[in-house]
Image (cartoon, helix red, strand yellow):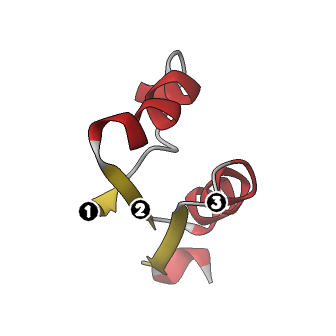
Amino acid sequence: MIFDTHAHYDDEAFQEDRDELLNSLNTHGIEAVVNVGASIQTTKNTLELMKKYPFVSVSYTHLRAHET
């Protein structure tokens, strides 16, 4: 089993092919992904990904003082 321990699949760089990419991970032996939140918004984005892809989880959110 391959476990991706640090990803940012919510990033806009994956906007065009995110669904295709995430749907193909299991085919390549990747069974779990930790998508790391870098802000409050990216953590919210990850929570949305988790609804669609049950193998995606969030590990932590790195909050900066101006976001609290």
Determine which residue is flagged by label 3: 54
Q: Position of residue 30 (x, y in %)?
A: 32, 50
In terms of sequence position, does the residue under pointer 1 or pointer 2 come before the other? Answer: 1
Q: Position of residue 58 (x, y in %)?
A: 52, 72
Q: Residue at x 26, y 62 (%)?
A: 1
Judge by depth and name the residue closer to the eye, 54 or 60.
Answer: 54
Could you give the CA–CA distance between mark 2 and mark 3, rounded to whole angstroms?
9 Å
Asked if one can make out residue 63 in the rendered structure from this viewpoint, the answer is no
In the image, what residue type sits under mark 1? Met
Q: Residue at x 41, y 27 (%)?
A: 13
Label 2 SS: strand
Determine which residue is flagged by label 1: 1
Circles 1 and 2 in contact, beta carbons < 8 Å: yes
Q: Dividing the image into 4 quarters, which one contains the C terminus?
A: bottom right
Q: Give the vertical position of 9 relative to 14 (above or below).
A: below
Judge by depth and name the residue closer to the eye, 2 or 65.
Answer: 2
The label nearer to you, 1 versus 2, is 1
Q: Position of residue 28 (x, y in %)?
A: 28, 37
Could you give the CA–CA distance between mark 1 and mark 3, rounded to whole angstroms?
16 Å
Name which quarter of the figure residue 38 lies in.
bottom left
In the image, what residue type sits under mark 2? Ala
Circles 1 and 3 in contact, beta carbons < 8 Å: no
Determine which residue is flagged by label 2: 32
Could you give the CA–CA distance between mark 1 and mark 2, rounded to whole angstroms?
8 Å
Q: Give the vertical position of 15 relative to 47 (above or below).
A: above
Q: Residue at x 51, y 22 (%)?
A: 20
Name which quarter of the figure residue 27 lies in.
top left
